[in-house]
Amino acid sequence: MKTTELLSHWQKNFGGQVTKNSYQLHLNVKDAARVEALVEMFPASSRERILSDLVSAALNDLAGQFPYQAGQQVIAEDEAGDPIYEDNGLTPTFLQLTRKHLSRL
């Protein structure tokens, strides 16, 4: 989910599998005020759910911003027949580590 989809999501429903782990964080005053504003705007949601959704959306946005770095190995061809090289940037490492931790959690 992207941050642009959060408002629609909060207005429709809540759910999804959550971990048993909890994460404690301190927010700066302005961000805390923004969170409290969202809690007041969407009283059917909880503060924790709003924070969880915000973190999820930010992580999705961040993962989409990792720059592509062409490797040496050709993994496919595009519609014009030009080679598509493996990604040696941050994306494959992030995905691999995410899968590792996902199986543990």
Image (tube, rainbow, N blue to C red):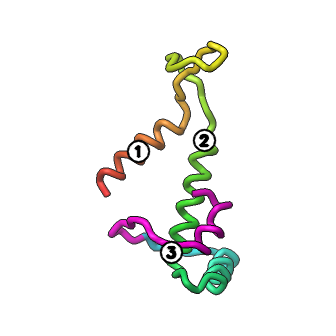
Q: Earlier in the sequence, mark 1 or mark 3?
A: 3
Provide residue 41's location: percent of width, then percent of height. Answer: 66, 83
> What residue is pinned by disc 1?
97
Between marks 2 and 3 in the image, the one whose residue lies nearer the viewer: 3
The answer to whether the residues at label 1 and label 2 have Cβ atoms under 8 Å apart is no
The span picked out in magenta is 1-22
Q: Residue 12 at x, y = what percent?
A: 58, 72
SS of the residue at dot 1?
A: helix
Question: Which residue position is annotated with label 3?
Answer: 49
Q: Residue at x 59, y 15 (%)?
A: 83
Q: Say which quadrant the C terminus sits in.
A: bottom left
Question: Which residue reaches farthest front?
Answer: 12
- Viewed as shown, does residue 29 lie left or right of 18? right
Estimate the spatial distance between the alpha carbons at disc 2 and disc 3, rounded to whole Å: 26 Å
Q: Circle 2 sits on which residue?
A: 66
Q: Foreground residue, 65 or 45?
A: 45
* Neighbourhood count class around disc 2 (C-alpha, 10 Å): few under 14, some 14–19, many 20 upward: few
Label 3 sits on what residue type? Answer: Arg
Tell whether label 3 touches label 1 (CB within 8 Å).
Answer: no
